[in-house]
Amino acid sequence: MSRYYAYTDAGKRLAFETRKEGKHVFLTLKKELFADADKISLLPELSQAKAGDEGYYIMPRNIEMRGDFQVFFTRRDDGETEYSHPVLSLYGVKKPGFCCLIRVERNYKFSYRIAVKDNIYTITPVVDFTKPDTDPPYDDIRLEVIELPQGAGYAEMARTEREIRLERGEITPLRKKMERPVVADAVRGPLIRIRMGWKQSPSPVFHQTPENEPPMRVACTFARVRDIADELKKQGIEHADLQLVGWNKSGHDGRFPQLFPVDERLGGEEELKKTIQYVQQLGYRISTHTNWIDCVEVADTFTWDDVAQDKNGQYLQIGHYSGGYAYHVCLEKQWKNALREEPKVAALGENGIHFTDVISIVEPDTCNAPAHPCYTKDAIKTAQRIMHLNSVIYNSFSSEGAMDFAVPYLDYALYVTFGDGFGHREYPFHDRYLPFWEMIYHGILLYNPTSPTVNFTIKEPEARLTFIMRGGRPSFYVFSKFREGAANWMGTVDLTSDTDEHLTESVKAIRKGMDLYQPIADKQLCYMMDYTFEKDGIQVAHYSDGSRIAGNFSDSRQQYEGNELEPYGYVVLQ
């Protein structure tokens, strides 16, 4: 195409300014052109394809989907679907005579609309200025189109994205990150998160005060953490990072952003320090969990002035957890809290990959408070400042999700998306799920694929195989299940330490995970170069060292290259 266009909801056509550098075309839509628009649809013509054409779209997953997905140009009834919160700010088009990757600058919140009308397919990123919690038209819209050879496909699209970010210095290979011992140990061993204490969640007390704050359940004291570490040693687990969740005042999600004092019901600060030292003396690493997105009224640091506001002046109340109604803090305001508290946490002596909750699995909130407006572009920069702060203080950083703006700072992500954690949902046009994110970022950071693959050794066979095929790091959670009358997104089966027998069985599940992981741990340093779908439910992950892992996603035995695969079994091919 020689011209590129966007369209307002009123049908007005707007032309992008273009700049070409080799195969890259950089597009800019000046903000003056859409200052009065309610919605803008970007580049619909670029993606147009006819039903029956060879090819497909590659669409990024959002935080609830099982993976990224292909849309094939099959004949189907007219319709459209739109979804928001994409994990990757890009999409791919492969059609007769044309193949490209389109990258969208994430300075606005946008959704993807896929439509078919009269057997014509289109994709368009949509920026909607009418929603209360979105940005006004404050900046230009920018995209980048990279034309690929006609024979290219999704493997080349993924490789192109990875190479662009590597060449621009935005991401670092995991092999390089392993120069830090804390990351090297993480490659070798599992993450074991331990939820120590929490109040009922969702709480029956929406607006908590010190006077009406509900009691906290003590599930695992600091002394009990030492027992877990002893059992890990007894069962021969050499490397592990124990991560304490809910160690802080009032437990998990109890009083964020307040952290201190360390909760006495768990043993208090001296017991915590003793446990940190004990775990380290056994040769393990240990880290803690903080949160710089949420705040609740019972916190001694709570102030309404910090809470983000929408365009109507309403506070952003998002979530209902142990501390009652949770509000999202304007990130510009939250910076001071992180700057004040994280050094205090570091002074406790932890040496594992520190974890900051939520910040990498959500798009940063837009704040429209007149006193401290913070739009998406600056909110992302501030989120990245918090991530960088943690990287400096702890020499490492991990978080809950894997949005692409967070990847430069992440050493580990607890899950790429929630997957089916909130229940399986079918989306229109989602013809086939595939690990496109993993094809970009495997070998860049450690991750667990989806929330249902936490505790993968005690999960159903499909979840276990998904963990292996998508290249996960073993990730376990003692007391993962804690919500009452609400979804527990990591599943209904659990690891616990409430009795000695349960503790032993939990560590056996971790030991089993390490037995499965150790023969393929070296793959963490490789890129996932391709992921193919063969007949009879066989899927194959291809790695940059020339090896492959073939998995059988069917209920019957299958043959693959002379190997018999049990249902939901796999084989490593060198």
Image (cartoon, grey):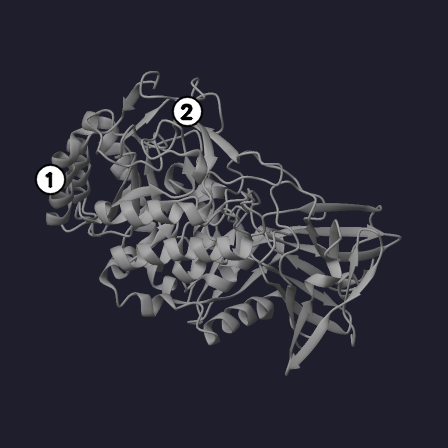
Q: Secondary structure at mark 1?
A: helix
Q: For this rendering, which residue is in front, 435 or 265? A: 265
On screen, residue 430 above or below 142: above
Image quarter for residue 572? bottom left
Total label count?
2
In the rendered image, which residue does mark 1 sit on?
Answer: 274
Q: Secondary structure at mark 2?
A: loop
Pinpoint residue 57: horizontal percent, then vertical percent.
69, 59
Image quarter for residue 323? top left
- Residue 74 in the figure: left or right of residue 554: right
Q: The C terminus lies in which quarter of the figure?
A: bottom left
Mark 1 to mark 2: distance in Å?
A: 29 Å
Pinpoint residue 151: horizontal percent, then vertical percent.
68, 75
Pinpoint residue 215: horizontal percent, then vertical percent.
30, 18
- Residue 386 in the figure: left or right of residue 8: left
Disc on res. 201: 2
One can see residue 150 in this view:
no
Pinpoint residue 277: horizontal percent, then vertical percent.
12, 45
CB under 8 Å between discs 1 and 2: no
Image quarter for residue 246? top left
Q: For this rendering, which residue is in front, 132 or 528? A: 132
The amino acid sitting under disc 2 is Ser
Q: The N terminus lies in which quarter of the figure?
A: bottom right
On screen, residue 276 above or below 203: below
The amino acid sitting under disc 1 is Lys
Mark 1 vs mark 2: which is more N-terminal? 2
Residue appearing at x 74%, y 72% in the figure: 98
Residue appearing at x 50%, y 73% in the figure: 163
